[in-house]
Amino acid sequence: MSVTREGGWYPLMLSADLETGTVAGSAVPGRDLAVWRDGQGRAHVWDDRCPHRGMRLSLGFVREGALACLYHGWRFGAEGRCVHIPAHPDLAPPGTIRTVPLPVAERHGLVWASVGAAGVQPEGDPAMEAAAWLPVRSVRIEAPWRDVARAVGMPEGRRAAVLDRDVDGRVLAALLPVGAGACMLHLLAAAPAGVERLHDLADWGRDVRSRAEERAGRACLAGIVA
Amino acid sequence: MSDLVLHDDDLDEDCYRARLFLSLLGLEARRVAVDVVPGGEQDGPAFRAVSPAGMLPVLRIDGQKVCGAGAVLLALAHGRPEWLPGERADFARVAHWLHFAGGPLRATLLMRRACLFGGAGDAPSARRRAAVGALRIMEDHLAQRRLEGGTWFVGEGATVADVALFPAAALCRDWGEEYSAYPALRRWVRAVRALPGFVGMPGIPDYG
Ligand code: FES
């Protein structure tokens, strides 16, 4: 009955949370990612592993259109190729020193990355296309993403959808699984939406979090008792 | 405000609160190092004569000794309305967050100390829950602030509340919390880093 779909497009974060010239950590199941935005505003998603010695690129910083590793300062340009090695400033780094970018898309106010073969764009539907989306917030929830998906009324097998809720205006919810028992819930409101409305949705996100974590906690307890 | 003296430990995040604020204010203090790990000097008679409860940091200011990060920050903020608003509602908000920094947020400091120096605390313990809970309170507040266009904990600019709260967020990776779970905190940490006069500490590199 339920569609188990690993792979495909994952909603990593709100576009608004990835400022120009910054890098952030993220993950898809089994894979840590570094997500960064260059000076032109383009988002890039790579494995969170420096090709030099494997340190985490998400701890680095963006300089001159490249992502610099914090450890020895090697820099990697938008295509993932090493463009600068501080210890050998005159050396043109060989093209073999590189990381392989993941396919990225920015749609509906979210940064998406694709793992494995999938379409050239993340899943969409007429409801998502029908509005411009304003960022509300992302909420970290210590509960399995499928439980949260069920709780918010996400259609089976989807990671993002416009929710049918009994409040004014439409809500775009997107879920990113993080590890086995946690997820990020990204919330956006259909424009136009006033500050009150945004606050209401942020409050709702907190409610979803506390209810989901309470259920997850209970499930644990029941398991111990059984 | 002549002859500021700071009794200080490089690795201590409470001392860092004081150093960071001094630097943001453009003030110089003569530093007297207190060797906490491994020296344990904060419990020795010489330091107890300076700080009876062994609390760090200690600031000598206008001939007074002020002990503890919260008190030091307040003493330095006094008479600077941009850092400590005089208007009652905003003053109350800053007081709220200063108290939070000296209360529930201590859980993050204890968690970090346990991980760095005690080799304990990695389990899903009560201590970890308290520490995560404190970070979440900050995250939730900043997420709400952003919806009305606010960057800082209180008002339109950085206040002493931001200084008091900053190290806990900036050092949370030391005890295993990642910014990916706290996007609003991450944005705010960047904003604090960009303040003129910002300085880091071991564990908080001060690259832009
Ligand atoms: S590990 Fe990244 S530059 Fe050395």
Image (cartoon, helix red, strand yellow):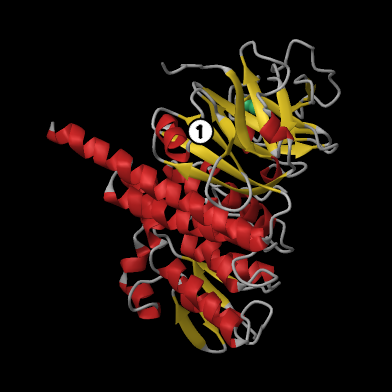
Q: Is residue B80 left or right of residue B180?
A: right
Q: Can residue B144 be seen in this view?
A: yes
Image quarter of residue B31: bottom right
Amino acid on which the number 1 mark rests in the picture: Met
Res A73 seen here: no
For ligand 1, the image quadrant comes to top right
In the rendered image, the vertical position of residue B59 relative to residue B124, given as above or below: below
Q: In this view, does B47 lie above or below B200?
A: below
**Residue B46 is drawn in which quadrant?**
bottom left
- Tell me which residue sits at (75%, 43%) in the image: A132
Q: Does the residue labelled 1 lie within 8 Å of ligand 1?
A: no
| In the image, residue A192 above or below residue B80 | above
> Which quarter shows the C terminus of chain A?
top left
Say which residue label 1 marks. A154
Per the image, label 1 sits on a secondary structure element best described as loop
In percent of width and height, residue B2 lies at: 65, 85
* x then y, percent, for residue B179: 55, 43
Asked whether A142 or A45 is in front, the reply is A142
Badge 1 density bin: few <14, some 14–19, many ≥20, Cα 10 Å: many
